[in-house]
Amino acid sequence: AMPVGIHGIQCQVLVPVAMVSFPVSPAPSTVASTSVGSETGSEGMISRQSSELVSETDGTPASPEQRDVAANLTGGSGIFGCVWDLSQRSKGCRHVQEMLQSCGDLERSQLSLELKGHVWQAARSACANYVLQKFIQVLRPQACQFIIDELLQQKNEVTDLARHQYGCRILQRLLENCHVEQMEPVVKLLLSEAMTLVRHSYGTFVMQVIFDFGTEEQREQLGITLLEALKSSSQDENCAQVLSKALQHAPQKETLATAMVPHLPQLARGRHSHHTVLPVLQLLPEAELNRAMTLLSQKATKLWASRYGRLVVKAIPSLYLQCCSLTRREAAVSSRN
C-alpha cells in the first residue's frame, strides 16, 4: 500500500474486510478487493458488511484516525460497517451525513440498521445526534420505527431526553417526520410531564412541535396544561414560546387568549413573550379587547422604556401616539415617578 498524506499526516490506505460489491470493472491492484462470504442483493449490494477495518499492510486493527481516512478514500461504500464508529467523531459524522444525502432509500435503510442498539447513546452524543437526525429526515417514516422502539425501551427516560441539549432535537425530528400513530406512545409520555417541559429551556422546543404536528386531542391536552401554567408561569420565557404556538393551533385558543389578558403588560416586556401580545388581541372578543387595551394603555410609558415593550407599542397605533413624543430615557424616568 502506498502512504497517503492527509493534513500533513502519512497514512496507509485502509479498506473494509468486506467491501460493497458493484457490477463494475475490477479495482486497481493497489486496493484489496476481498469479499469474504458476501451475498449480493438485487441491486448489486451486499446485504451484510463487516464492521472491522484493518490495515492493508499488516492486518492490525485500524485506529479512529485511520478509519476516517478509509471512509474518505473509499467513497460511499466506505461507510458500510463503519456508521456508528464514524458518527461519534466530528469529521466522521459530517461524512456520514453527506453520504446519506446522496444514497438511495435501500442504502439508507441498510446503513440505519448499524445504529441499532446505539440510539440512546447517539441521541445524547455531541456528534452522533446529527447523524441520527439526518437518518430520521431522509428515511421513510416506517424505517424509523426501530428508533422509536428503542427509545420506548426506557420509557422513564423519554422526558429526560426532551430536557437534554441534544436529545430534544431527536424528539423534534421524530415528531416532524414520523406518523402521528407511530409517535403516540412518545407524545403520551411527554404530555404526562407537560407542566415542567413547557418551562424547560430545551423541553419547550419539543412541546412547540407537538402543536405543529400533533393530533387535535394532543393539542387540546397541551392547551389545558398551558391554562394551568398561566397561573404561576405567566412571565416564564420558555413557557411563552409554547404559548405562541398554542395561540395558532390550540383548539381552545380563544379561551387561552382571554386568560392571558391580565398578564399582557408583563408579557409585552419579555424577549419571547412580547410575540404573544398581538395574537392575543386578534383573538379577543370586543369586551375583552377593550379591557386589554386599557391595561396596556396604563402601562404604555413603562413599555416604551423597555426594549421589547417598545416593539409592542410601535405595533399598536393608539399606544404609539401616546408615547411617540417621549424619548426612551424620559419614558424610563416618567415610569418610575
Image: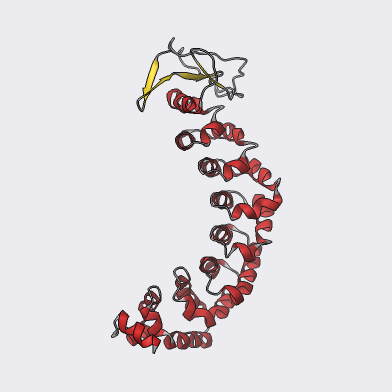
User: Which image quadrant for residue 319?
Assistant: bottom left
Q: Is residue 126 visible?
A: yes
Q: Look at the picture and state if 133 lies above or below 53.
A: below
With 306 as the anchor, is 255 left or right in this view?
A: right
Q: Is residue 181 visible?
A: no
Quarter holding the C terminus is: bottom left
With 292 as the anchor, is 321 left or right in this view?
A: left
Q: Image point 71% across, 45% down: which residue?
A: 153
Q: Horizontal and vertical percent for residue 146?
A: 65, 41
Which is more toward the observer, 167 or 20?
Answer: 167
User: Which image quadrant for residue 75?
Assistant: top left
User: Which image quadrant for residue 257?
Assistant: bottom right
Q: Look at the picture and state if 160 lies above or below 59.
A: below
Quarter holding the N terminus is: top left
Q: Horizontal and vertical percent for residue 199?
A: 57, 65
Q: Image point 32% across, 80% down: which residue?
A: 328
Q: Image point 55% across, 43% down: which residue?
A: 125
Q: Horizontal and vertical percent for residue 322?
A: 34, 87
Which is more toward the observer, 178 or 58?
Answer: 58
